[in-house]
Image (spheres, rainbow, N blue to C red):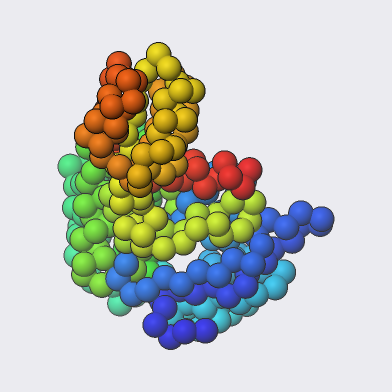
Amino acid sequence: MDTEFVLQTHHLNKQFGSVRAVDDVSLGIRHAEVFGFLGPNGAGKTTTISMILGLTYPTSGEIKVFGERVTPEHNRALRRVGMMVGEPALMLAFSARRNLQALSYLYPDLPAKRIDEVLEMVDLQATRNLPVRKFSTGMKQRLGLALALLNKPDLLILDEPTNGMDPAGMQEIRILLRSLAEQGTTVFLSSHLLHEMEQVCDRVAVIQHGQIIAQGKMTELLPKHDIVHIRTANLEQTVQALKDLPGAKHIKIDASSIEVQEVSSEQVLSFLVTRGLTPKEVSVSRPDLESVFLELTQKTA
């Protein structure tokens, strides 16, 4: 396994009876990048993360964190990892500060000021002494993130960190994660909020039915061409005509309009007019991570 990776899985498999929940998953997460892990419910994300964190044994394959093999019995490397997976385990009768203080006893060398630092990082300073039972879902998520950051981790593993947050809160967390990466922290981020992932991740992997179906830089996965949408009364005739337009690709009927890629709206309009097929409307959209994700997962459904 390659030493350039902070986290790496190699041909990872997990079998539950006759069901293979994780099937030959190989990932490599580099230093100081934000890596997105995407997939529909039941795709194998949580099972993969559980194995990475040494919570369950793989059926076969290997996991290394900072170059050290990780299993439930060999987890020394996880001391340098901060994690928030699922709903944060919080003491509801205690304040945010008391929750952090309780965890800090596990790190005797931790500076006392670190608690205030992480409270400020997640914007909980003003409510640090309020009982957690009075927190909203989004505030509890912030506290869970503060707990994950307390030990100044070199690798941060997060599962749905912005659950329950409003758009402003999501933006703050997105800025925080990018800032952490710029300061040298590696972030492994699992989320179903594709718009957020698109804005914060350097690279992503898409998992479906336990298998990685796509992996790469965000710039590699997102199409480089706009999508031209055409509304017309002559759908079938227009589709047939567009097949003769040089460069036009991925022509398809979508609901009441036609989509075509790799040509400009000006080219489409000019070409159709010369064929006597003046459309009602021509518009342009930019493909995003959500459209790519849906196309990938529908192909393998």
Total numbered labels = 0
Q: Considering the image in quadrants, where does the C terminus appear?
A: top right
**Residue 106 can be seen in this image:** no
Residue 96 point in image, percent of width and height: 31, 48
Viewer-side residue, 224 vs 85: 224
Viewer-side residue, 97 vs 148: 148
- Residue drawn at x 55%, y 57% is 213
Q: Is residue 294 shown above or below 176? A: above
- Residue drawn at x 41%, y 44% is 249
Question: From the viewer's perspective, is 297 left or right of 132?
Answer: right
Q: Is residue 31 shown above or below 274? A: below
**Residue 238 can be seen in this image:** yes
- Residue drawn at x 25%, y 72% is 184
Location of residue 14 by image quarter:
bottom right
Residue 29 point in image, percent of width and height: 42, 70
- Residue drawn at x 58%, y 45% is 299
Q: Is residue 298 shown above or below 281? A: below
Residue 31 point in image, percent of width and height: 33, 75
Give the residue at the far right of this rendering. 18
Viewer-side residue, 94 vs 178: 178
Location of residue 267 by image quarter:
top left
Residue 50 point in image, percent of width and height: 57, 61
